[in-house]
Amino acid sequence: MTPSNLGLQVEEERGPDQSIPYLATARTAFVGRTLRGPVNRPVAVKSFTEFEHVFGGLWQPSPLGYAVEQFFDNGGREALIARIVNGARSATLTLKAGAAAALRLRALRPGTREFLRASVDYDNIPLENSTDFNLTVQRVRAAGAAHVEDQEIFLKVSLLPTAEGYLPLAIAQSELIQLLGEVPPQRPDRTLDAVSGLATGYVHSNSDGDDGAPLTDYDLIGSQTERTGIFSLQQVDYFNFLCLPPLARDQDVGVSALLVGARYCKERRALLIVDPPSHWYTADDALQGMRDWDLSNENALMYFPRLLALDKLRGHFESFAPCGAVAGMLARCDESSPLKLADNAEEPILRPGYRLICLVAEDRRMRLATLGVNTIQAVRSAARIKVAPRTLAAARAGSADWRYLASRRLALFIVNSIERGTRWVILAHPHIEVAELAAAQVRAFFEKLHEAGVFGERRMEEAFFVVCDQRVNSPAAAHSAEFQLVIGFAASRESEFHSFRISHSP
């Protein structure tokens, strides 16, 4: 088994013996409330058009749609959307089954914008068979419309529990519906066209869906065991940034949700983009607010001020939290300037069409930076003093390097690359060659970084180290199919290293 070298380019996963390089495009996760879509199941979208198709687009009560729009407007390429609800209810669909009974179905996705219709026919079913039927379920764009967005067809569905196509089993994997109540005593009536009474027609879903109440911090946090809220992101392999847009237009995300989000980002080796509170109207407000700020974390960052952008639903400019635009700008900079050269890259600039709610003077920008708050720039200026972007760790960082966004992102880049690229070791037979191959693979990766100048003027032997021999992998660990490696790479200070232990287990 010979794993390929770790690289900086995007490659497809071709099997357990191939390394999985870190994706170059920043992948941003958004968690919040949307018009429609699957609940607590993240979906990847690569354009705002895809977001509109799955999640319904802009919605005035929820800032998440606007954040996603601003993400793509400012250069973002890939977003993960996790829809969260608070008491939302799904619409039902009733198909008559004789004079007194009915087959009742419920939409799998809750909300008032999930429009379904269903049809029953007996095509290709023998006349003497009175228990089987064909069921077609469609999602349509609007109530009563005929524009079909999705469709599922269930052939020869049966009411008999012993049948292969027993109704509850036949629709168990449906992405549109689920059974509500008991199986009816007789099969549902054939659905006829309402006008002619002859051709096959459709029954539309009832108007009993509900969008639920506005989100709370409790809803946003969710449950780790049930994989809801923020923890629904457990279902995805990786993300680089996490955005928690405001709960509503007039309600910021609470500190409790931010703390959980930052802690979760640390576990997932990602960064939380924190929005400045809505009452920070000026730079002086931000400086005053940072005195009582409760979140100091090397896996979180903040950009100030908020943005003025056109609200396409209201037809005028509104103030918006900047997390989506910031994520888009950072993703755009990653494509134009490699992460390893981020310290020398041009600062991210807002795209045309967006303005800042206030101007930040040069002295205020410097003071905010010392507190861990970065300033969004709407125009490029050669006269402006360059200030390296910071994390929210500020002076409380565990390492001086973690105060700076570029250094923290570089460390996460390295650790994520090696963790993803060495997963093959778990599928390999435990013998000494595995450790040798893994060590050679990781060293080759570090050598590429060294050649690219990531570690400055340091010599190769002073830039990094890799340990995955018997010092960290005991015979007992090998017997249990666990594999560990310890890596270290040069910090900004001479003779200092950032060290990490990476563990793989089934």
Image (cartoon, rainbow, N blue to C red):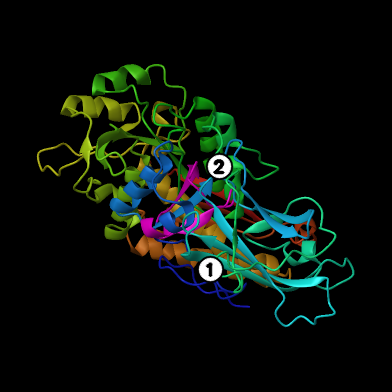
In the image, residue 96 sits, relative to residue 289, either above or below, namely below
Q: Which residue lies furthest to the right in this view?
A: 162
Q: Can residue 489 be seen in this view?
A: no
In the image, residue 240 sits, relative to residue 229, either above or below, namely below
From the viewer's perspective, tell me whether residue 71 is left or right of residue 443: left
From the viewer's perspective, tell me whether residue 373 is left or right of residue 256: left
Q: Depth check: give the residue in front, 193 or 216.
A: 193
Magenta part of the chain:
26-50
For badge 1, the amino acid type reads: Gln
Rendered-image quadrant of the N terminus: bottom right
Q: Is residue 44 magenta?
A: yes
Q: Give the alpha-carbon distance from disc 1 to disc 2, as whole Å.
A: 41 Å
Q: Is residue 142 magenta?
A: no
- Closer to the chain start, of discs 1 and 2, is 2
Q: Depth check: give the residue in front, 78 or 51.
A: 51
Q: Can residue 476 be seen in this view?
A: yes
Rendered-image quadrant of the C terminus: bottom right
- Numbered tag placed on residue 441 in the rendering: 1
Q: Residues within 10 Å of mark 2 (few under 14, many from 20)?
A: many
From the viewer's perspective, tell me whether residue 313 is left or right of residue 422: left
Residue 291 image position (x, y, % from top left)? 37, 17
When asked about the image quadrant of residue 27, the answer is bottom left
Q: Residues within 10 Å of mark 1 (few under 14, many from 20)?
A: many
Residue under label 2, please give it: 84
Residue 158 image position (x, y, % from top left)? 81, 69
Q: Depth check: give the residue in front, 106 or 233.
A: 106
For badge 2, the amino acid type reads: Ile
Q: Which residue lies furthest to the left in this view?
A: 383
Residue 152 image position (x, y, % from top left)? 62, 68
Q: Depth check: give the residue in front, 108 or 468.
A: 108
Please give the name of the residue rendered at 54% of the width and 30% of the height, measured from the top-left corner. Answer: 216
